[in-house]
Image (spheres, rainbow, N blue to C red):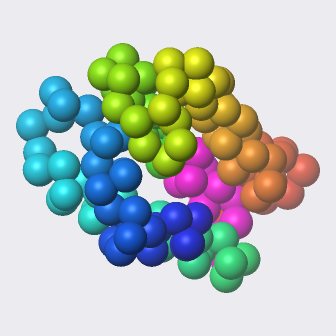
Amino acid sequence: MTLAGVGHLTAQRQEFQAQVPTWLPVNKDAVVLGSGVAEIALGAAMLSGVQRRRVGLALAAFFVAIFPGNVSQYVSRQSAFGLDSDRKRLARLFFQPVLVAWALWSTGALRRDRPAD
């Protein structure tokens, strides 16, 4: 997460702009910069190990929040990050729920056997 966030702020900035939905009434670069800062913060929080369950829930919510960008990239046929065909862009859509599940599983966010952080 932290490395991806740094990519938002540096070399991969234009690639990430391809994922910002055209219907979003916000500057694409501002969205990319903001999501990059969020990814850095979430990555750092994951590494810290503090309040893992809350961080897992926040990370899962982040992955859900950016999903419309992935759909937009597919619908508008924007190539970025090697996703240069409809087939590749469509396959990526099915990977997003895996990221949500990973965020919840790896942090124990859904476990009921201990009190919440």
Of residues 111 and 13, the one nearer the viewer is 13
Name the quadrant of the N terminus.
bottom right
Decide if residue 37 is on the left or right side of residue 98.
left
Residue that appears at 36% across and 17% down: 75
Residue that appears at 58% across and 19% down: 87
In percent of width and height, residue 26 lies at 11, 45
Locate residue 35: give its quadrant: bottom left
Locate residue 30: give its quadrant: bottom left
- Note whether residue 8 is visible: yes
Does the magenta run of residues contain 49?
no
Residue that appears at 32% across and 62% down: 13
Q: Is residue 52 above or below residue 79?
A: below
Furthest residue in direction right, as rendered? 113
Please provide the residue range marked out in magenta: 50-60
Residue that appears at 85% across and 57% down: 114
In percent of width and height, residue 68 lies at 38, 29
In percent of width and height, residue 83 lies at 52, 36
- Note whether residue 93 is visible: no
User: What is the tally of numbered marks visible in this picture?
Assistant: 0
Name the quadrant of the C terminus.
bottom right
Decide if residue 35 is on the left or right side of residue 87.
left
Of residues 10 and 31, the one nearer the viewer is 10
The majority secondary structure of the magenta stretch comes to helix
Q: Is residue 10 above or below residue 84?
A: below
